[in-house]
Image (spheres, coloured by chain):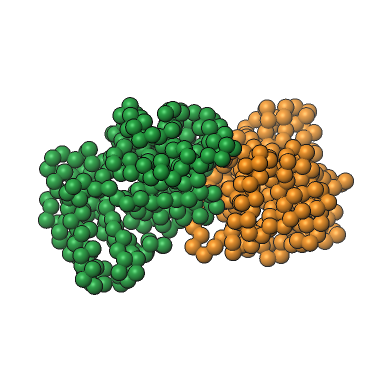
Chain colours: A green, B orange
Amino acid sequence: MKIIRSIKEMQAFSLSAKRKGGSIGFVPTMGALHEGHLSLIRRAKKENDIVVVSIFVNPAQFGPREDFEKYPRNLKKDAQLCEKEGVDIVFYPSAKQMYPEGFKTYVEVEELSEVLCGRSRPTHFRGVATVVAKLFNIVSPEIAYFGAKDAQQAIIIRRMAQDLNLPLKIKVMPIVREKDGLALSSRNVYLNPDERKSATVLYKAVREAADLAKKKISDPRYIIQRMKQIIRREKCARIDYIAIVNMSDLKPVKKIEGKVLLALAVYIGKTRLIDNIIINV
Amino acid sequence: MKIIRSIKEMQAFSLSAKRKGGSIGFVPTMGALHEGHLSLIRRAKKENDIVVVSIFVNPAQFGPREDFEKYPRNLKKDAQLCEKEGVDIVFYPSAKQMYPEGFKTYVEVEELSEVLCGRSRPTHFRGVATVVAKLFNIVSPEIAYFGAKDAQQAIIIRRMAQDLNLPLKIKVMPIVREKDGLALSSRNVYLNPDERKSATVLYKAVREAADLAKKKISDPRYIIQRMKQIIRREKCARIDYIAIVNMSDLKPVKKIEGKVLLALAVYIGKTRLIDNIIINV
């Protein structure tokens, strides 16, 4: 396994791999890798000749009062995990290289970026779309893998790839959870033991919603109300949003039918966690 | 020569050409080809194995009260010109294919898009950057060719290609002019015979500025004043802007030294024309 830090070198590697007919599977990450990331890497390994994992804590997707500084970073541990999974290249660029002086170009996916998480994180998805477009152009993968935990992100990136005619496939892999249901996230390390216990409330609320939908309850307001009740029982939990939306435009549905996305963000203490489920009735 | 109308087919062609090691030179146009375009095509032909010319009147770069509807279109004539120059592929997509229902992604090059022509055409460069990013992803050229007449466009596209790490080179070729100095433009057909004569005033003003700079006059305000005097002599001319700016950030310079861009836009009757010169003292 090789760690490449230079954009030029990464681009040259990809070009030469492509010329030899090798397909590149790409897993973009911010590091602090967990089993969720590893599930993407394993799938990429199965489906491609070469696997590239990028590790880049992208300043453009953090708001001014967010956790950019304290976001967990551990290249050594991440590299070991990648090596063990048979990753070929870890791409690890510096922020200075990715956003040099005079940088001015942003990719905006309108409407989809403004709702749900975009409401409390107004420049987040612009930062995500921009860095992912850059990484796609640097790595030029055949297939790029994303986790379903970041459901809105996955929908935005799919839209971007389609709208900008990026010649690649996006695959979205299932959420990986702890035994008690908590969705894996690099941010779970922020939780103290009490908060860690409370954090399971997101999944409890998600399960409740799924159960109600299975029982043919089709009124989203009723389901959201029940979820709120569950979450409010936890003292350190504060709801950012709960929404049941259309998969294509992320607009709230009036009735649950077909395939809809139920997504929520909840502060557990100071840590903002997200979870979601696709309901298909 | 082949005319390709399908994005998928174009993308497949490019991929297969790349696999065979062929380099693609790309000339994106809105059709209504003139000697300016042909000079780009000839250069592309010299420097690449394959030449692709796109013809697409891009709705996203026209404002609501601009000339999208009446912009000259003549595929047959354009195709004949391309064929004569040895173009391999004319890529001619429909607007419906380029901007399908649900399209939401735009590429924005901040600051550079808001000044000069961007001031009177506020969404123009967003439309340009977006369609060019799309075309680059569809055609995947090694080199793309642009005309120096659209100086701001060229600077924005260079910035975009660099910021988004697009793996290609941008080449900007000199302005081609009529014998009387008028810069070639597809919009020149809008001019009636009187306006056609008046239109030479843009180049006259540009020449005057260049002469003054050569005489070591370094105050941009003085030069702009002299240009205004020249243009105001023409009854049907109305100045949109005249600016002397830095090549990197398009901000007005206080003193003419080194390499600066002198750019202007002038309405001749209802037709908005642009011209520019790079002054290097």
Whether residue B114 sits left or right of residue B154 in the image: it is left
Q: Is residue B75 left or right of residue B122?
A: right
Q: Is residue A37 visible?
A: no
Is B188 placed above or below B170 here? below
- Image side of residue A120 versus residue B175, left or right: left
Is B46 or A265 nearer to us in this picture? B46
What is the x, y in percent for residue B131? 60, 52
In the picture, residue A56 is in which quadrant?
top left
Spot the residue most to the right.
B179
Q: Quadrant of residue A220?
A: bottom left
Q: Position of residue B147 (x, y in %)?
A: 72, 44
Name above or below for residue B261 compared with residue A112.
Answer: above
Percent position (x, y) of residue A184? 26, 45
For the residue pair B267 and A176, the one nearer the viewer reads as A176
Q: Does A113 sit above or below residue B149?
A: below
The quadrant of the rendering that contains the C terminus of chain B is top right
Residue name at image x 77 percent, y 42 percent: B45
Residue A47 visible: yes
Q: Position of residue B219 (x, y in %)?
A: 68, 32
Q: Nearer the viewer, residue A66 or B26?
A: B26
Depth check: give the residue in front, A224 or B263.
A224
Q: Residue at x 57, y 34 (%)?
A: A16
- Residue B120 placement, left or right of A81: right
